[in-house]
Image (cartoon, helix red, strand yellow):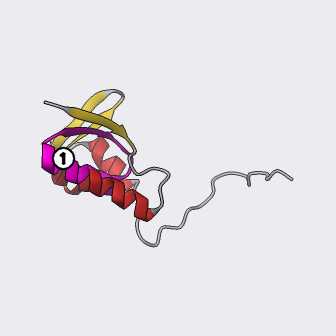
Amino acid sequence: MWFVAASDVSACLCGEAGRARLNLLADIRDETGISYILISHDLAVVRQVTDQAIVLRRGRVAERSPTPRVLDDPQHDYTRLLRACVPRPGWKPRRRGAAVPRPG
């Protein structure tokens, strides 16, 4: 079995280039049966490219299931906490503490 390990495959790319890269990965997987080990904070990428998801906490597996179950119905408290941290439509960031000085 062959596999590719990749970290944040869509990071630092504009929308079009990121989509093209993800589509290419999906096409290669479909044609060759290759497996990916994908390390990502982008849950949309995880959903698009993976069949199985593993959530790690402090280097240990917290949850492992088919991707839709992990993302839509997490079973572990840590996974639920991570999902709750994802910004939702209408989210407005607030600064904590004092304003950050800007270089002048």
Mark 1 Cα-neighbour bin, 10 Å: few <14, some 14–19, many ≥20: some
Q: Nearer the viewer, residue 88 or 29?
A: 29
Q: Nearer the viewer, residue 7 or 99?
A: 7
Q: Position of residue 94 (x, y in %)?
A: 59, 61
Q: Position of residue 91 (x, y in %)?
A: 48, 67
From this viewpoint, is residue 47 visible?
Answer: no
Q: Which residue lies furthest to the bottom in this view?
A: 90
Choose top left, top right, bottom left or bottom right for residue 48.
Answer: bottom left
Q: Which of 35 and 51 is in front in this view?
A: 35
Residue at 17% in and 39% down:
34
Is label 1 in a helix, a strand or a loop? helix
Q: Image check: 74 left or right of 44?
A: left
Q: Where is residue 83 in the image (x, y as percent from the top left)?
A: 33, 53
Residue at 40% in and 57% down:
18
Please say whether residue 94 is one of the residues in the magenta stretch. no
Type of amino acid under label 1: Arg
> Compared to 18, does 51 lie above or below?
above
Q: How many marks?
A: 1
Q: Image check: 65 left or right of 12?
A: left
Choose top left, top right, bottom left or bottom right for residue 21.
Answer: bottom left
Q: Position of residue 6 (x, y in %)?
A: 34, 38
Quickly name the residue at label 1. 29
Q: In which quarter of the image is the N terminus?
A: top left
Q: Which of 56 and 95 is in front in this view?
A: 56
Residue at 18% in and 47% down:
29
Q: Residue furthest top?
A: 59
| The magenta segment | 25-45
Residue at 28% in and 53% down:
24
Please say whether residue 36 is one of the residues in the magenta stretch. yes
